[in-house]
Every structure is written in C-alpha cells, then in structure tokens.
Amino acid sequence: MPETILQVCLSTSWGGQEMVALETAQLLQQKNIKCTTVTVSGSPLMQRLVHSHCAVLECNSGTFRTLSSIIQIRRFLKTQKFSTILVQQLRDLFWIRLASLGYKQNKIIGISHTFLGVFKKDLYHRWIYGRVQEIIALTETHRANLIDHLAIESEKIVVIPNSVSTEKFSPRHKNALLRKEFGCDERTVLIGLIGRLDKAKGQGLLIKAAALLKNNISNFKIVLVGEETLNEQGNLGELKNLCSELNLQEEVIFTGFRTDIPQIAASLDILVMSSDAETFGRVIIEGMASEVAVIGSKAGGVVDIIDDGKTGLLFEPGNAAALANKLLVLSQNLGLRKELAHNGRLKVLNQYDQGKVNEQLLNQLIA
C-alpha cells in the first residue's frame, strides 16, 4: 500500500509549529506522497494550505468542536486508509487516540514544539501515549526534557531539528542598499532582532543593552524587524517610549512587517535572539545560514544550536549587561565576527540544511 499521511494541526494561530505543518504538507506534495492536513476552518494555516493546493480536512473551532471533529476524523480514517498520522501538537493526541480506536494500522507520530513543565506519566497519559510510535523533539536538550516528562519510552523520542533553506538564507543576499536604508555606512555595526514585537521575544532587553553599549561605542544601529502580535497591540508604543527614555531614537529602527527577511538577515553584522527561552530558535539558524555572527540566550534549545565561542555567543537570559558585553566584544572585533559567522554557516550546512532535515523526516514518516 502506498504511503499516505494524515497530518493534524488544530491551531488557530500562526507561528513556528504552523509553519512546520505547512512546510511538511508542501514537502510531501513535492514528493508525490498523499497527505491531507486536518486543520481549523478559516485558520491562517488552512488559508496557506489551500493557497499551496495542499489537501485539507476542515474542522470547526470553538469549545464544542472536539466531538464532531473526532467523528469527522474517524470517518476519514475509515475511508482513506492512512498509514501514518502526524500530530503537530501533543495536546491533540487525545482526540486522535479516540478517533483512531480500532485502527491499529495507523502509525501515530507526534511532534513537540515546546518544553514541558508538567509531568505527564499518569494512567491517563500512559493510555494516550500507548498508541504513539514516536515523538519528535527539536534538540537533544528538548529530548531530555520530554524523556523526563512524558509517559513514553526514551527510545521512541528522536531528534529532528527545524531546518532552513541555505539557498534562501545565504550571504549572497547581503544588500548594500538595505544597509543604506537603515542609515549604515561601512563603519556602522548593524545589529538586528527578527521576530514579532512581543515581550517574550526580548526586544526591550536588547534596547536596554543598546543603552549600555552606547556608553562605549557610537557606530551602531539596532534594527527591530517585525510587527505586533495580532490582537495584542501596545508593545510597539512601550518599546518606542523606552527608546525615548534611554535616548536611543537615532540608534533603534522599527521596520514593521517585512517580506525581505533573507536580505535583511544577510545584511546584518550581528543577529540577536534575546528571548528568555526558545525550544529551538529558528531565527538563529537563519542568521547562521546567512553567515552572520549570532548572539542568543543561554536557555532552552539554543544551547544545542550555538556552540559558545565557536558558532556564536551565549549570554545569561534577561541580563542586559551580559548582552551588552557580548555586543561590545563583537562590535570591536571584526575578525571574531567573521570567524563565528563562517563556523555558523558550516554548522547549518551540516546539521540544519532543509534538504538533509527533510530526508530525516521522510525516513521517519514512511519507515
């Protein structure tokens, strides 16, 4: 029987895991592997899947969606005979467990996109994970966290990282006109943070670090690329007020939403990820692929991506002074920036290249 995949992502948001779901559907489509994605009607993911001509099974959102969705998915499993069910949110495994009762021919694989803080080893969770053949973690640190918290054998938890297109994110996209747009000449150190404007992403911390950096050097610009989280406006105003308080109006640039992220990433001198914790930190590998020196918080899965002092620099989460120190070191040492950037791209080519990671995923799905 040819391999057929049912992917499940019952999310109404748009972020990292939804992006992975879209990319997975597109990959399977390119490989001529039949895939249908169960998603919420009208969600950003559903809209993008339809735009990409990927097959979808729409479920209603809301409090009472679950029972009807279970029935809908169960009927679909009966008629379509899927060989593998790929679940993008572990919390949806319960509904898939119910929907697939009696259909033991379906292999169930879950992907975890977050660290867990609650132990899930009771009888209820043992029942849920009893039918799961595999859980995919994003890094070794993430895998260790899942082993500690989930009711599943450690050998069933494997690491398949997020990936990046090393053609899309490449040093060849460096753009002098972009640097000029941001007010930079050849002597200016351009420091960037790419991500939605959200307190969890640490833009405020970078601004505070910039104020400390300004005590030592003046030839730098900070570019904050991204817009506010939908329905959570107000952070942009707070960040601009912080810039005013710290006299950084000339140094900090807010770009808003941009479509030229690969070009911006390649045009930076330093890329910063200042979140308190990220399970993976995809923007880090995008910066490394662009052959740009990266600085990241020493937390979460980032410690598996950045080899401190070799492929980037790490700083203590939430510590503006520590971040400012790392920025100063790289701002004053072009040779170190180039060395870290070169090593970073080599690591991405070896471990996070989209083609290589896609092969790992396909091997798990169709094994």
Image (spheres, rainbow, N blue to C red):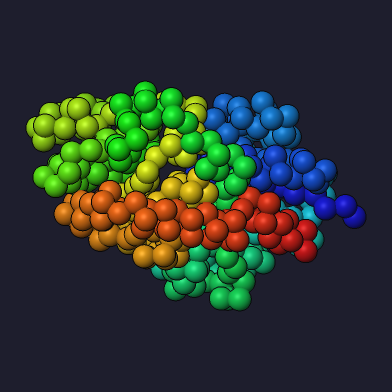
Quick one: 265 or 146, which is closer to the camera?
Answer: 265
Name the residue rendered at 26%, 51% in the picture: 332
- Residue 71 in percent (x, y) is at 68, 43
Name the residue rendered at 45%, 68% in the picture: 141
Quadrant of the rendered structure where residue 79 is?
Answer: top right
User: Where's the C terminus, which quadrant?
Assistant: bottom right
Does the rendering let one see residue 225?
A: yes
Q: How many numbered marks are there?
A: 0
Name the residue rendered at 48%, 49% in the picture: 291
Quick one: 366 or 73, which is closer to the camera?
Answer: 366
Please determine whether, in this image, residue 231 is positioned above or below residue 331: above
Is residue 174 found left or right of 255 in the rendered image?
A: right
User: Where's the N terminus, which quadrant?
Assistant: bottom right
Quick one: 104 or 16, which is closer to the camera?
Answer: 16
Quick one: 151 or 182, which is closer to the camera?
Answer: 182
- Residue 246 in percent (x, y) is at 11, 35
- Residue 262 in percent (x, y) is at 51, 36
Does the rendering let one see residue 302?
A: no
Is residue 215 found left or right of 356 in the rendered image?
A: left
Q: Residue furthest right?
A: 1
Name the residue rendered at 79%, 45% in the picture: 31
- Residue 159 in percent (x, y) is at 57, 65
Please determine whether, in this image, residue 271 is positioned above or below residue 231: below
